[in-house]
Image (spheres, rainbow, N blue to C red):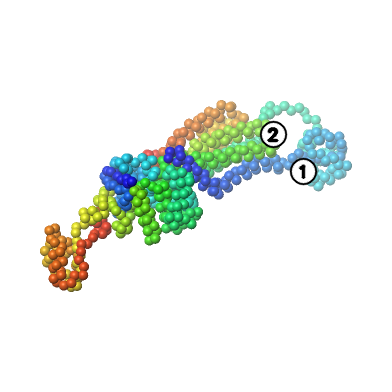
Amino acid sequence: MSTYAAAKVVAAREIKVKLRDKTFLFSTAFFLLFSIAVTVLPSLFSGGPTSVAVADQATATALQQADLEVRVVGDDAAAEKLLRDGDVDAAVVSGPEVLGMSEAPNDVVRALSTAPPVRLLDADAVDPFLAYIVPFALAFVFFFTSFLFGLQIAQSVTEEKQTRIVEILVASVPTRALLAGKVAALSLLAFVQVGLIAIVTLVGSRLAGLDSGVLRLLEPTIGWFVAFFVVGFVMLAALWAGVGAMASRPEELSSSSQPVQMAVMLPFFAVIFFGENELVLRILSYVPISAPVAMPTRIFKDEAALWEPLVSLGLMAVTAAVLLAIGTRIYEGSLLRTNGRTSWATAWRSNATS
Amino acid sequence: MTTVLNVSSVSRSFGDRAVLKNVSFAVGGGKLTGFVGANGAGKTTTMRIILGVLAADTGEVTLGGTPLTREVRQRFGYMPEERGLYPKMTVHDQIVYLGRLHGLSSSAAEDRTKKLLERLGLGERAGEKLEKLSLGNQQRAQVAAALVHDPEVLVLDEPFSGLDPIAVETMVEVLRDRAATGAPVLFSSHQLELVERLCDDLVIIADGGIRAAGDRATLRAQHAEPRYQLQVDTDAGWLRDQPGVTLIDLDGPRAVFRLQDGFDDQKVLLAALERGPVRSFGPVVPTLTEIFREVVR
């Protein structure tokens, strides 16, 4: 049997096991709900256009033209009563005078006044709330998904090592087939999860009726994010397997996997804290470990030229090739060492099994 | 068809500790070969090298004269010293999985797994997670893992440890069946009586070197000097004065003695009969334990 065929059998088992795993099912459901919540809920809570009660027909026409929800009533008292009862957000009585409960209904005022002409110098600038929440959501999804699936690669390796089944496995298929199968399976599951999140978010944001300016930025952002996620995850996948093999028991995994955990965690905080700083963000968007979050953030802020994500992806692909080789060597060097935690130096040196 | 598995001049060191020193022996096809030695003598290391889990520093392992490759080893069955399967996977699923890894098609793996689990008395447990089984049944599952692909060579490290007597018998049957197909079967064990009862051939290892290897009867002849046991009705102390006799053990009417070359055992019997009735007389067949003690000394 070829290495490829063996890797396929290994991958099939991993997927089968994970699809029955509660942690996996739960995290997928959680992320989908999370992305629905982020996109759809804000517009549900904002509650649609302001409703206004009015008696005067001419005023009603003006308000209707401003896309407000107008209720025409018999007299001013009836309008005020509707407002007091909470049936409408505002009322307009003769004067004309605008009534509100606790806040001035600005859109009603605007509809009835003659505004001076406005010229926006940066018409596409993103709503500050979205400008904050989108990078955060990207960082959050990247961090949790790659952490969760990366850790599962490591755990699955440690499990095989701890139960000693690894000796039977290694006696029947090449070590590389085991590694490749595991990495391929967990990567695939991670991609599916991120892909689902992306689709739900895109569909959700359309349904929620985000304005077209935001969508014009959000759609490429999510598209690039998926691409960056794929390369970014594969980049660290073999290292996760390597640190999994260094631990001989699950308890040792948290210490052996620390460097890889850092590689996932640091970019998350860097982007959260320095997201406002254009220079730092620009640098982070080229550093392979932080690029998957930083570059899509810049794309969302409309700060990146088209060539930039391509160059950054290229850098990541090169890094991925190097880290895959390192991870493979660490994995092979420590897989069959069963007496305690293997050090990085030992794992690196003992390429032959011993 | 029988093929010989040959281990030739294999050495292996861990750091500056030489664990195997120029180890050579053959495992004949169609035979059960017992691999015995004290703890730390090098049995497990040798087996791991045969399976390619560990590399030899020098020397090689061949099957039918051809050096082992990954493809050839894939048709080996292996039961490692430290047992382990996936605790959270069902017995059925993991045996099928291992069958697939050994190159079986998916339907062949299903088919073999079903038959094998029936045979090993695990048919009803097939759908249970491994961790739910008793230790004895986990051990049976481990045997199934080694046999699922009808291996051409079987290497088992301490296959009998932890088995109840019934499971031991099942295991013995399974090993004999496999050998009957012409496969070389090598297994290690501490239970020398069991090895003695089962094995056609023996390999004795001590301190990283092979001390004796070959046919059980030949080994006996080579490694234990001929001894006799005599049982009479009265005290057998007179044997001390019998020419050519060296007493090894005397317990009233029962004696074990060695006879020098050139002296006739029948003369000793006649001398005994002159003194009274003889209840038993005959050569003592050395037990494996005795041979073992003798060769590793």
Q: At numbered mark 1, what does the secondary structure look like: helix, strand or loop?
A: loop
Question: What chain does mark 1 sit on?
Answer: A
From what the image shows, is residue A220 above or below residue A250? above
**Which residue in the protein does label 1 denote?**
A102
Q: At numbered mark 2, what does the secondary structure look like: helix, strand or loop?
A: loop
In the picture, residue A101 is in which quadrant? Answer: top right
Labels 1 and 2 positioned on one and the same chain:
yes
Task: Point out the image quarter for the N terminus of chain A.
Answer: top left
Q: Give the camera-side residue of B95 and B206.
A: B95
Q: Residue at x 82, y 45 (%)?
A: A82
- What percent of the width, then of the height, locates residue B289? 27, 58
Disc 2 residue type (three-letter):
Asp
> As drawn, is A236 to the left or to the right of B50?
right
Q: Give the camera-side residue of A62 and A118.
A: A62
Q: Label 1 vs label 2: CA separation?
A: 28 Å
Question: Which mark is on residue A211?
Answer: 2
Q: Residue at x 72, y 41 (%)?
A: A46
